[in-house]
Image (tube, rainbow, N blue to C red):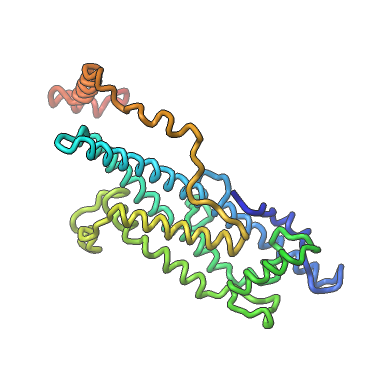
Amino acid sequence: MLARRIPHASESARWAVAEVDEGGSEGEGMNDKVIEFGETWNLWHECLSSKDPNSVFSQISYMLWDTAIFRLIIESRQIQARNHIDIPELNGRIILFIDRNFFEAQVASIRRQTDNYSLYGERGVYSLRALLKDISDKRSKLTRSTFINLQNISESDWTDISEAHQRFDKLSGISSVNRSNDDLIDANIIKKLFSKLKTCEQIALYVDKYIAHSATPTSRSITNVDETRVTFREIWKAHKIIYRVMEFLCESLFSSGLSPLPLEHPTMFMDSGIPIIDTSRISNLENAWKDYRTETNSWKFDGFDLLWKWLDDENL
């Protein structure tokens, strides 16, 4: 949950704290700058932690929730294996199916945070890399005065105003005694965040060559991706990095904290003992398998002429 509501840009202008006489031209200019930058500010917030299903926080929540469920499955397997040491009652084919689909979904989700597209336009994406790039591109416009005026702070709330200044002190690398309205975020801060995220790029490369695309041996050899081994341990590590980059941005820019893993429903474990497959109805399972085999076999062409008939017939 957000620790503090983030105001819309036009709304935040009401909390402008100008260090000039009320009604002065400099104060009006500062409000104009706040409103002008507000659209970008709102976009950053929406990208990070809005309720949009594609926001970075939403993506992280799905990743971590699915991982929590997968860890329950792993724990269940280990319990089953310990209780049946000689003949563990586990179906290898189903285990492989679960593991493969979880693995591919997770590495694809990690890759999405390294997407190199922009936040804008028809191909705009919500990703940490896109956000960091936009922050870097617009760094010169986010001055200390604009930053302070974009916070949801009342003019009389000097405690929160002081806290916001302290956050920008850290972002700018400027001490409190040397503050200026024109202070900017230190470019090295953004570079360090890019560097943190860069540790996920090997996973992204693996996805590009094996999951998002079916790369040829020649294509794979150019990047030596065949030598890359992505393990579950590396996935857990990437989760932590992605969350911490997001959390750093949420806390330092918006003074908001977000819990990594969503809360489980109180009744979540009440039906955990219900099996996925009812072994007392094996015949039903066999029939379902045979029905699908019959369906897929019907796709085959019974003769060369029918192959060409299918090609020419738009209804087949």
Q: Is residue 163 left or right of residue 117?
A: right
Determine the residue located farthest toward the bottom in the rendered image: 178
Q: In this view, does 250 lie to the left or right of 72?
A: right
Q: Is residue 178 above or below residue 14?
A: below
Q: Is residue 124 visible?
A: no
Quarter of the image with the C terminus is top left
Q: In this view, does 280 lie to the left or right of 251?
A: left
Residue 65 picture location, percent across and down: 43, 44
Q: Is residue 306 above or below residue 136?
A: above
Residue at (20, 58) in percent of width and height? 226
Q: In this view, does 305 lie above or below 263?
A: above
- Closer to the camera, 106 or 132? 106
Residue 9 picture location, percent across and down: 70, 56
Asked where in the image residue 164 lies, by quadrant, the reply is bottom right
Residue at (79, 70) in percent of width and height? 18
Residue at (13, 26) in percent of width and height? 304
Residue 104 picture location, percent across and down: 31, 46
Residue 240 picture location, percent across and down: 42, 57
Q: How many marks?
A: 0
Q: Is residue 118 visible?
A: yes
- Closer to the camera, 123 or 223? 223
Asked where in the image residue 11 lies, by quadrant, the reply is bottom right
- Closer to the camera, 187 or 245? 245
Q: In this view, does 83 lie to the left or right of 275?
A: left
Determine the residue located farthest toward the left in the rendered image: 303
Residue at (37, 60) in percent of width and height? 200
